[in-house]
Amino acid sequence: MHYGPGMSPRRAIAILPATQAAIAEAAEALTRGGLVAFPTETVYGLGGDSTSDQAVAAIFEAKGRPSFNPLIAHVAAIAQAESLAEMDETAHRLAARFWPGPLTLVLRRRSDCPVSLLASAGLDSVAVRMPDHKVALALIEAAGRPLAAPSANRSGRISPTRAEHVAECLGGRVQIILDGGPCRVGVESTILDLTEAPPTLLRPGGISAEELEEFLGLSLRRSAQSPEAPRSPGQLESHYAPALPVRLNAQAAQENEALLGFGPADFATINLSPTGDLVEAASHLFAMLRALDRPEFKAIAVMPIPEKGLGRAINDRLRRAAAPRGRP
Ligand code: TXA
Ligand code: MG
């Protein structure tokens, strides 16, 4: 074991050569809600238990993202993908041909999908991929659950293709970095949205659009905006918003309103975090908005959330949920 450069001595971080023992230790950390950076064939991922709201919130905090970009659930087998998402014939053909490999499929979530709603940012879809790297596959298998993993860089920085890059960028924000050497592909996976026909290319990546088009025998739709770009208000419709109107910065509920609390507030209908913990609040956000989105209420009022750390991402999402919208 050695310690990577560029991090505070207070929270030094272990870069471990990806031996079987290190993979077992990392899997153990993941099942306890910890974060592990691991190699894939594209770039290093910042992995956490995709089925845990808390672990997913910790990923967003470590990335320092001002908004909740949905994350990819990494699987080790096609059967595991089937347990998360509806896979139609096209999905099966693509998976059989390109998995493991740098292709991410955006699919409809199964109703019993165990992936945290925070990981798919409240969407009804989930992004799934099987990485072509023996360390990644062994880690997912040992953890016994799909791993949520964005690229292991801070928001706005370049994706890391070596363990040392991760150490430089994320410092003590991750428990373990598994070192599997440099990444073979070096650019992120291609993202293909299969939730509507024809399939839409959301992000060019390790597998070319031409190769996919030739294999499928059709032209892909190109998305107007890269999913990496900040989501504009025009994309609101594609995001989950509660059916009920949302009122922000509420100190108390008005008549027939549900109150989503933050901080000490016995009077709240439910509370994102009675102790005012932003990581806990983020982990509950989407599930609690859904829970309050019921016909017995006329609106959802939300108490103020501080505009710092994960609070910025929570507020970004809440402002979208509260934005005026056209209803059919
Ligand atoms: O190669 C890769 O894909 C790497 C390695 C670690 O697997 N991962 C990666 O993750 O690039 P990330 O979080 O940096 O990028 C994931 C992209 C984001 O742009 C996000 O918007 C998109 O996937 N995405 C995830 N879930 C989605 C969904 N349900 N619908 C649409 N886009 C989605
Ligand atoms: Mg990224």
Image (spheres, rainbow, N blue to C red):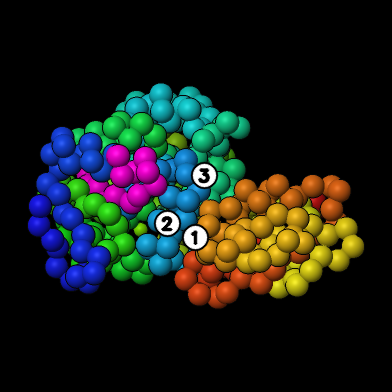
Disc 3 element: loop
Number of the label disc, if any, that sits on residue 279: 1
Tell me the mark number nearer the camera, choosing from 2 and 3.
2
Determine the residue positioned at 86% across, 66% down: 254
Residue tagged by mark 2?
58
Mark 1: amino acid: Val
Placement of 122 over or under 306, stated as above or below: above
Determine the residue positioned at 59% across, 43% down: 124
Determine the residue positioned at 83% across, 60% down: 257
Q: Residue furthest left?
A: 2
Q: What is the CA distance from the residue labelled 3 to the residue labelled 1?
A: 14 Å
Q: Earlier in the sequence, mark 3 or mark 1?
A: 3
Q: Taking the image as drawn, is residue 97 in sight? A: yes
Q: Quadrant of residue 32?
A: top left
Q: Quadrant of residue 247?
A: bottom right
As for residue 27 lying within the magenta part, the answer is no
Q: Tell me residue 210's x, y (percent).
A: 33, 43
Disc 1 element: helix
As for residue 35 lying within the magenta part, the answer is yes
Q: For the magenta stretch, what is the residue range?
A: 28-41
Query: Quick one: label 2, few (<14), some, or many (20+) residues within 10 Å?
Result: many
Disc 1 CB within 8 Å of nearest ligand 1 atom: no
Number of the label disc, if any, that sits on residue 116: 3
Mark 2: amino acid: Ala
Q: Tell me residue 123's x, y (percent).
A: 58, 48
Q: Tell me residue 6's x, y (percent).
A: 18, 71
Query: Quick one: label 1, few (<14), some, or many (20+) residues within 10 Å?
Result: many
Disc 2 element: helix
Verify CB contact (< 8 Å) between mark 2 and mark 3.
no
